[in-house]
Image (cartoon, grey):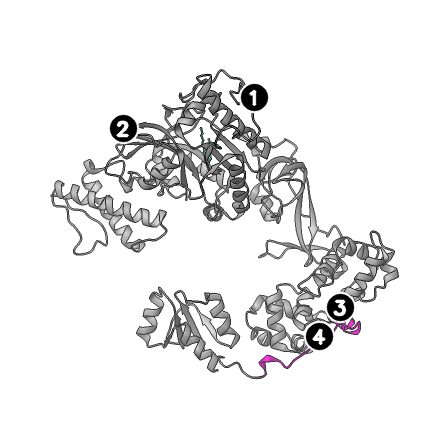
């Protein structure tokens, strides 16, 4: 007799007393676990707690250990990975895995659509089409289109426009999944298109890929083709974990996906968060091929194979270009990288008639976005000084066209980052420019490192003012200690002071600030208010009109609010929200200055909502510096004013001393909004319920916190009750 031995198994858990019972239970468990996998990975809606899943899983592992004959390739236990292998066995693709022709400009798409409709018309009438119908058949026609007739301009002059399936071009790696009788039996990489590598053990660890198709009537053979990729959030998490473990970090999600799939130890792959989207088909035996590409993908969905939802059936070049633009706009907000879109003639029979040319189908086109990453040479690393003295290393690059613009500089963030990315001067580097994000150096191509590559050395003196550069042990950022002596910091401080959310001085841009500081016309923000039209008009790129506009803008900016003024001062860690809190709390600027100058006791600053020890210390330090208070005095003398009020703290806040805990989802307020409402009235919002909790505010799906509150007899409010309580205060 054999028994399952699973730690922590409940008293009424199944005990397999014989092989038949074991087989039956294993089958039940497989179905059950597959159902939970789908709920978790595809629907994002787990049906049971993780611990319960683990218990069922453990039960199946134990059964398969006790009865090895029960081990099956489609068992979820296969997903944890197995023993390392020496290498990957070659797999010859029964249907070659081809690549796609690329297009970049609108004209390329129009030409493609024209080729397709001409080709279809041509094939109908005149020739039998080269390579038609045979996968990989090499057409005898040179160039990309088998065109003999006069091309028409719109592609649909002689009939209805061609119907296309438009989808995303995922930036991962191609994979072929072979299902026999509905069970995943083999997974292979593309390789050279003819022969790939057997990565079945690794693919089995990807939870989104079904080990068994969701049908009672599977085809004898179905070879699903698609892309393995890594979502950006998963990539970031993986890199954080790699870094914490002192392991190599990956430059981008694609490399992380490729590296994870080529692991010889599938237990490592099992820990990597890989994803998959299907987009094509290889061999199909024992089922009818769907008539269109879109129907094929619909069928996949019913089989439980992941297919991306962003796909459309469109007509003609106009439809294709519309899809391209819509996806282009959404690109930055997609949770994974794409490098373009793919268009495929939708009807299978039309695809077959068009056939292939060279290594790519005539019926498809990859319409690529401008590359977001490119290779170039790192010529040098210089440092830039920010408003608070932060020293940022900046890469000087050989000009490179990336993300739709020519890039010559890119940020390297800080010294640690340079070490972490192992970037040296002279290296070939990968530069990334995505959307509006500042270009950055992602990493170096190590096998192209020249012998004379140099490591970056952080300067010890500020390149602008010569003051010492200092780096606190627990900070990543090095800083220039020059403060406002440093012209670089002064320029940044002035720009900060003038920005829209601060004093809002319209027309004071960086070129002007540059001149004003470099020609020593102004030193501090107070000097701005001494500027006259004549002096300004004498500057480069300034005319009388722009000079008097600026003087008018300065006049307007004199009348501001205390919150804007505090924000404009550029105190480290004091953003707009904190500036507002300080203004409300102290009412008058002198109250704030007095608190800071009194002694180094931070208690009163800490009483301001959302001000913690680091912020309090920074505020205190700022006002302890006499030169900062002097600039404030000069600004007041120059006529900068704001309405002052009584300090809010004069009367104790009505909820001072009360502790609240928020749990669950409130009907209309976000967690942060509810917290802000409570804190504004002096309450403390804590993370866990204890005997000291005064109230718990509970919304939908409140869990253990609610239970604990009830157990401890802590009053529980819903959102309405909380609002009523606050309104009554
Ligand atoms: S179809 C014969 N569809 O792009 C056509 N490919 O440049 C085979 N790719 O190796 C490919 N998204 O790795 C197709 N929606 C998509 C795709 C896609 C990404 C990749 C695939 C292929 C490469 C071709």
Locate residue 92, reporting x and y percent. 37, 23
Magenta span: 627-650
Tag 1's secondary structure? loop
Q: Is residue 648 magenta?
A: yes
The residue nearer to you, when weighing 450 against 592, is 592
Q: Is residue 310 magenta?
A: no
Tag 3's secondary structure? helix
Q: CB of mark 2 within 8 Å of CB of mark 4?
A: no
Q: Residues within 10 Å of mark 4 (few under 14, many from 20)?
A: some
Q: CB of mark 3 within 8 Å of CB of mark 1?
A: no
Tag 2's secondary structure? loop
Q: Which residue is mark 2?
A: 286
| Earlier sequence position, callout 2 versus callout 1 | 1
| Earlier sequence position, callout 2 versus callout 4 | 2
Regarding residue 693, the answer to whether it shows in the image is no
Q: Residues within 10 Å of mark 2 (few under 14, many from 20)?
A: few
Q: Give me the disc on residue 556.
A: 3
| Earlier sequence position, callout 4 versus callout 1 | 1
Which mark is in front, 2 or 4? 2
Q: In whole angstroms, how far apart are the C-alphas of marks 2 and 1? A: 42 Å
Q: Which residue is mark 4?
A: 642
Regarding residue 721, the answer to whether it shows in the image is yes
Rendered position, 350 above or below 340? above
Which mark is in front, 4 or 1? 1
| Earlier sequence position, callout 2 versus callout 3 | 2
Q: Quadrant of residue 687?
A: bottom left
Which mark is in front, 2 or 3? 2
Q: In whole angstroms, how far apart are the C-alphas of marks 2 and 3? A: 79 Å
Q: In whole angstroms, how far apart are the C-alphas of marks 4 and 1? A: 75 Å
Locate residue 438, reporting x and y percent. 62, 47
Q: Quadrant of residue 19?
A: top left
Q: In whole angstroms, how far apart are the C-alphas of marks 3 and 1? A: 67 Å
């Amino acid at each position: 007799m054999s028994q399952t031995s699973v730690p922590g198994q409940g008293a009424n858990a199944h005990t397999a007393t014989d092989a038949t019972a074991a087989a039956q239970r294993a089958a039940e468990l497989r179905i059950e676990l597959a159902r939970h996998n789908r709920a978790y990975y595809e629907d994002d809606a787990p049906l049971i707690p993780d611990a319960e899943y683990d218990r069922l899983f453990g039960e199946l592992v134990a059964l398969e250990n006790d009865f090895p004959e029960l081990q099956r390739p489609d068992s979820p236990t296969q997903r944890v990975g197995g023993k390392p292998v020496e290498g990957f066995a070659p797999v010859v693709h029964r249907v070659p895995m081809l690549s796609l022709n690329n297009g970049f400009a609108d004209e390329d798409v129009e030409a493609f659509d024209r080729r397709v409709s001409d080709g279809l018309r041509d094939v109908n009438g005149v020739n039998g089409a080269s390579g038609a119908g045979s996968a990989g058949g090499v057409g005898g026609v040179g160039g990309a289109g088998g065109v003999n007739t006069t091309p028409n301009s719109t592609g649909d002059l002689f009939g209805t426009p061609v119907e296309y399936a438009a989808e995303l071009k995922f930036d991962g790696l191609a994979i072929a999944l072979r299902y026999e009788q509905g069970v995943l039996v083999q997974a292979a990489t593309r390789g050279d298109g003819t022969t790939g590598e057997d990565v079945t053990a690794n693919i089995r660890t990807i939870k989104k890929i079904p080990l068994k198709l969701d049908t009672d009537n599977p085809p004898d053979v179905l070879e699903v083709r698609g892309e393995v990729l890594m979502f950006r959030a998963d990539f970031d998490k993986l890199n954080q974990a790699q870094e914490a473990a002192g392991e190599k970090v990956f430059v981008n999600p694609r490399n992380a996906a490729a590296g994870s799939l080529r692991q010889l130890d599938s237990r490592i792959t099992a820990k990597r968060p890989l994803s998959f989207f299907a987009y094509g088909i290889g061999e199909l035996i024992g089922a009818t091929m769907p008539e269109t590409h879109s129907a094929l993908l619909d069928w996949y969905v019913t089989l439980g194979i992941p297919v991306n939802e962003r796909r459309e059936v469109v007509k003609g070049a106009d439809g294709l270009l519309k899809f391209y633009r819509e996806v282009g706009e959404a690109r930055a907000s997609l949770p994974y990288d794409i490098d373009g879109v793919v268009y495929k003639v939708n009807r299978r029979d039309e695809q077959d008639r068009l056939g292939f040319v060279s290594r790519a189908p005539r019926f498809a086109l990859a319409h690529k976005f401008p590359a977001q990453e490119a290779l170039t040479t790192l010529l040098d690393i210089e440092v830039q000084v920010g408003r608070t003295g932060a020293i940022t290393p900046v890469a000087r690059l050989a000009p490179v066209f990336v993300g739709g613009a020519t890039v010559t500089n890119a940020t390297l963030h800080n010294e640690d980052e340079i070490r972490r990315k192992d970037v040296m001067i002279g290296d070939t580097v990968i530069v990334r420019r995505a959307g509006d994000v500042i270009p950055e150096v992602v990493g170096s191509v190590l096998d192209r490192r020249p012998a004379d590559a140099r490591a970056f050395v952080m300067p010890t003196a500020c390149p602008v003012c010569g003051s010492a550069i200092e780096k606190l042990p627990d900070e990543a950022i090095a800083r220039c200690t020059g403060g406002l002596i440093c012209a670089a910091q002064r320029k940044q401080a002035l720009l900060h002071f003038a920005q829209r959310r601060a004093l809002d001085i319209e027309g004071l841009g960086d070129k002007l600030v540059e001149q004003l500081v470099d020609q020593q016309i102004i030193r501090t923000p107070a000097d701005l208010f001494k500027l006259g039209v004549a002096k300004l008009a004498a500057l480069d790129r300034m005319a009388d009109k722009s000079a008097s506009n600026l003087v008018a803008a300065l006049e307007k900016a004199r009348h501001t609010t205390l919150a804007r003024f505090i924000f404009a001062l550029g105190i480290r860690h004091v953003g707009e929200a904190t500036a507002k809190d300080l203004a409300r709390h102290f009412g008058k600027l002198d109250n704030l200055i007095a608190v800071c100058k009194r002694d180094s006791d931070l208690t009163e600053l800490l009483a301001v909502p959302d001000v913690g020890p680091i912020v309090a210390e920074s505020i205190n330090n700022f006002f302890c510096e006499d030169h900062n208070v002097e600039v404030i005095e000069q600004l007041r003398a120059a006529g900068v004013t704001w309405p002052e009020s009584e300090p809010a703290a004069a009367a104790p806040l009505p909820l001072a001393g009360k502790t609240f805990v928020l749990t669950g989802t409130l009907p209309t307020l976000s967690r942060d909004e509810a917290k802000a409402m409570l804190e504004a009235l002096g309450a403390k919002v804590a993370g866990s319920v204890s005997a000291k909790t005064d109230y718990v505010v509970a919304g939908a799906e409140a869990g253990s916190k609610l239970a604990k509150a009830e157990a401890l007899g802590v009053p529980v409010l819903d959102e309405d009750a909380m609002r009523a309580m606050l309104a009554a205060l």
